[in-house]
Amino acid sequence: MDFTQTYFALFGLPATYALNREQLDSAYRELQNTVHPDRFAAQPDAEQRVAMQWATRANEAYRTLKHPVDRGVYLLQLQGIDALDAHNTQMAPAFLMQQMAWREAIDDARAARSVEALDTLIDELRLDHRRIETQLAELLDARQDFEGACEAVRQLRFMDKLIAEVGDVYEELEG
Amino acid sequence: MALLQISEPGMSTAPHQHRLAVGIDLGTTNSLVACVRSGLATILDDAEGHALLPSVVRYHADGAVEVGYPAQRAQSLDPHNTLISVKRFMGRGLSDIDDAGSLPYHFVDAPGMVQIKTIAGVKSPVEVSAEILRQLRARAEAALGGELVGAVITVPAYFDDAQRQATKDSAQLAGLNVLRLLNEPTAAAIAYGLDNASEGVYAVYDLGGGTFDISILKLSRGVFEVLATNGDSALGGDDFDQRVFCWMVEKGRFQPLSAGDMRLLLTKARDAKEALTEHFEVRVTAVLSTGEMMDATLTQTEFNAMTASLLSKTLTPTRKALRDAGLAVDEVKGVVMVGGSTRMPCVRQAVADFFKQTPLTNLDPDKVVALGAAMQADVLAGNRAGDDWLLLDVIPLSLGLETMGGLTEKVIPRNSTIPTARAQEFTTFKDGQTAMSVHVLQGERELAVDCRSLARFDLRGIPPMVAGAARIRVTFQVDADGLLSVSARELSTGVETSVQVKPAYGLADDDITRMLKEAFTHAKDDMYARALNEQVVDANGLIAATRAAVQEDGALLEPAEHGAIEASIAALENLLTQPDHQAIKRGIEALNTATTDFAQRRMDQNVRRAMAGQKLETFS
């Protein structure tokens, strides 16, 4: 196993943020079909161990490329940039204002015990998530604006946290 | 006797020989064993034609053990020594068992897992389960006329690491080679979904005797990908019985019950529940040993009312699983019903209402898990060629570590596809700190005390440095059985301290050895003969497989490497002339070590070939 090979190369994909999801899924399935430990359960230990290493790497690579934040972080890491560096927290004021507004909306929905309000909110959040993803693809693939890309990645992380918080409130209201 | 067969050359595992492998559903209430014969998965019945083996074990004073129907019949007569639903105690401490006070057992609060005092001594749930597995193994070997090369054993998808480890230990104790621990809903999905026409997202709703699982799977071109799983490992048909039992106690105005009467009423409660599947109402009568009696009618409406909260307890995990999968109810193409408890009309109705569609019930919900496990066992044993399906399963609960302030830091999130590995780096918080204690947790809660503690270990020998300078990397590896191993390493100075842990709930190898000895004393079997037999079969299999690999891919080896492998084969063959199972075991390990690089290169080659085809496909 060649650990210097990138996750993109592993699946025979171009190293871009824009992703052909069908191609990724199909390459992942092909790779797991070849390396999964279930294919080697009747084989000697040495082969079973190798299969576990490979399948583990295939899962890690697939998970990373599938996930909008992780894929961005990974591409920046290939450029030698730590997008989630704790010292780098710059964020556009407008985005921060929007964050606060959303957080208040979550609190309001919780107080009102309104599942409908949560439904509306989650749709909005997902829409904005996709908007930032498109932006990030532009920044990374076309403009190679890595600083801008770092900020977009951080914004996506914020959005993920908000979406997770909405999930918690759903659970609270259902329970 | 097994010993006589071991010198037969036919016992070696030639590549094209059909290998006997079974699927075992080790259930809370009932267990089954199944096998693929002539391409068809079939349940193996016992000599009397019973498919189910009640998961009941009775211990006698002389050490004799009864399993199944005879034990079940004795449960009211001998409640303290007749153990039922022991699956609920697997990998559990006494404090985990809510209703311990109302069960007729003498629990012993052992470290790690609870134990039960019987007339034949103190028994761990692992040993009790092993009795059930041993019975099933014997049934299978009698039906198939040979020794098993291995078994797929099913576990609830929501079982945590401790419960999985306990199950695997049981199998080892029963002399079974575990090909894989397989999640019950996934096994059911195989049995249901293998006609290739079924593509899309399916939900498997599995309500058994003592556990509830919900799994969301995507089926696509022969790949079963579990997207999310959730559940409750302490919710099942037993709880429905309990509700009826409480109703009976109320109706009969019974005084505190003896253990035998309690079992009597619980059995009657279960009969009433089952009768309500077919009838709108049922007359329930009971006469206790004290002469007290009850006689009342229970209607389906009353039953539904008293169990409604149990049903809603299954829908909360269902919602969570859908949310984790990022799917809405209307994206689910079909719902598969698994587990005897899904026979209850109220359960079917609740599931139909939730998913807005009629659930699939055309396979026997008691048998579908064992059948799927048998099909997977057939694949893992290497009996099929080419047209195999592939399972991509997940871990049900997040794995993490305790950090400062008693908080949980997640290392591997729930619903991660297995096998998987993740590393997390930590640092020291005091100047000159030379040791660090690592506490491994499983669960979703923020506070460490609210999660299940899997293991604690200390990493020592960290070179003294200022606070924050040391870098300690903790690596979690989860294998294809969903079992965790953890290692820790200090990186900053190049000093490596590595620790491998097995979760605290797992049995130490010494315990296994002791229990094996005890078991064999009663089984009148020869432990050494069996151990030797196993090693000889393994060694022959390994030699055959290595030769086949060298034949196929010898070009990947340098002459010196080829020579080293041949030498290891010759050494192992030499060891096989002596009846020393320990020496043979070492020889097997040596040959495995000698072929590690070769295995890597072969896999690299396989991947290159497979992915080259992939690229051609995508660009054409």
Image: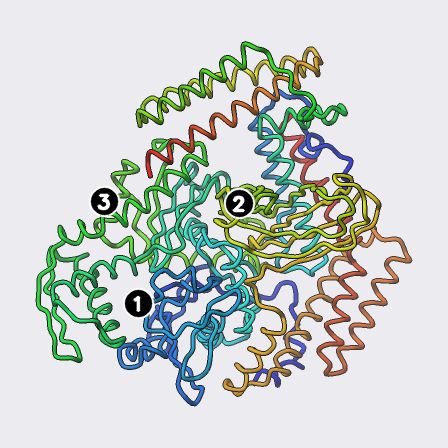
Chain of the residue displaying label 2: B
Q: Which mark is residue B367?
A: none
Q: Label 1, label 3: how many angstroms apart (C-alpha)?
A: 31 Å
Residue B122 sits above or below residue B114 on the image: below
Along the line of sight, the residue nearer the viewer: B195 or B238: B238
Q: Residue furthest front?
A: B431
Q: Chain of mark 3?
A: B
Nearest to N terminus: mark 1 or mark 2: 1
Q: Which residue is mark 1?
A: B102
Nearer the observer: mark 3 or 2; the answer is 2
Q: Nearer the viewer, residue B303 or B574?
A: B303
- Mark 1–mark 2 distance (CA, rounded to whole Å): 32 Å
Instruction: Return the disc, 1 or 3, that comes first in the chain's sequence.
Output: 1
Secondary structure of the residue carrying tag 2 is: loop
- Residue at image position (48%, 17%) is A100
Q: Give the vertical position of B199 relative to B157 (above or below).
A: above
Mark 2 residue crowding within 10 angstroms, few (<14) / some (14–19) / many (20+): many
Q: Within 10 angstroms of label 1, few (less than 14), some, or many (20 or more) residues?
A: few
Vertical order, A131 against B238 (above or below): above
